[in-house]
Image (cartoon, helix red, strand yellow):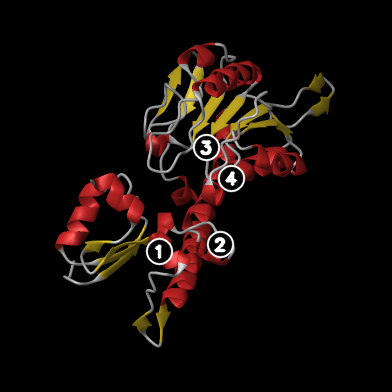
Amino acid sequence: MREGATLISPLYPLVNHDLVKALVARKMTAISLDMIPRTTVAQMMDVLSSQATVAGYYAVIMAAHELPRFFPMFMTAAGTIAPARVLILGAGVAGLQAVGTARRLGAVVEVFDVRKVVKEQVESLGAKFVVVESDEDAQAAGGYAKETSDEYKKKQADAIAKHVKAADVVITTALIPGQRAPILVTEDMVKTMKPGSVIVDLAAEQQGNCALTETGKVVVKHGVTIMGVLDLPSRLAVHASQMFSRNVEKLLLYVTKDGAWKLDPKDEIVAGSMIVKDGDVVHAKVKERMQ
């Protein structure tokens, strides 16, 4: 790229250190779309949320296609057919969209999240919130989750194991920015699932929430189909592109004026998303990670 140019893109700079070094070497300015803070003003620029909406919706569609049974309850001449049971791990944007989609298809939905604040949102969509008996809450700044204690993780694993065993579909969405996705579904848990059950791992790009996920692949382990498919938004390219372009448009209008850049380092959105400025790493957290 031309030296001194400005790049606006999802960069994932907390882990892509070689990319940040290349930007520095070219004396570029770089705004990372995945680092835009989740504030009210920045909501219309939030690429992660818009693409997570697509991924959460499509994860349920994929699971319904793969599952060898109905999602809704049916009253038939051959008797009553019970609805599918769906467990969703993580109630962020993708998780909540998955909840709504699974409920619209008629499934019984349970949701687990380490952030207790999302319980009301989950229940408002008609799903049951899986409670771990603990005073600990993993709500972090910006609505993300943070690491929990070993004691909490043990209680969490016990609760998840019980619900995984009963589920026909498990959709995992748990991510911690800049870190490997936490393992929430172990191999032993997979072994307890009914043959033909489905796991859709939306954390596959960060090695997955399921211990048996293979990034970019659909595999069958212990009779369970585990989908580590990447880039789900591309499966619904029309609306994914429409949402992405609107996010970027709003960002460009915010950081420019009269055709010139308006990159105020004191502005919350600029400070949160500008990683490199004229060849210098200016984002404190990225700078710290690269030392």
> Is residue 269 shown above or below 87?
below
> Which residue is denoted by mark 4 in the rendering?
57
* Residue 209: image tag: none
N-terminal of the two: label 1 or label 2?
A: 2
> Which residue is denoted by mark 1 in the rendering?
271
Identify the residue at image location x=46%, y=45%.
Answer: 232
> Which residue is denoted by mark 2 in the rendering?
43
Identify the residue at image location x=42%, y=35%.
Answer: 204
Q: Are marks 3 and 2 in contact (CB under 8 Å)?
A: no
Q: Position of residue 283 (x, y in %)?
A: 33, 58
N-terminal of the two: label 1 or label 4?
A: 4
Residue 11 in view = no
Residue type at tag 4:
Tyr
Q: Position of residue 267 (x, y in %)?
A: 45, 70
N-terminal of the two: label 3 or label 2?
A: 2
| Disc 1: CA contacts within 10 A as few (<14), some (14-19) or many (>=20) | some
| Disc 4: CA contacts within 10 A as few (<14), some (14-19) or many (>=20) | many
Q: Quadrant of residue 34?
A: bottom left
Q: In the displayed structure, does residue 192 sit left or right of residue 117?
A: left
* Residue 173: image tag: 3
Q: Position of residue 268 (x, y in %)?
A: 47, 65
What whole-number distance in Å separates the C-alpha atoms at marks 1 and 4?
31 Å
50 or 36, nearer to the observer: 36
Identify the residue at image location x=55%, y=30%.
Answer: 66
Residue type at tag 1:
Ala
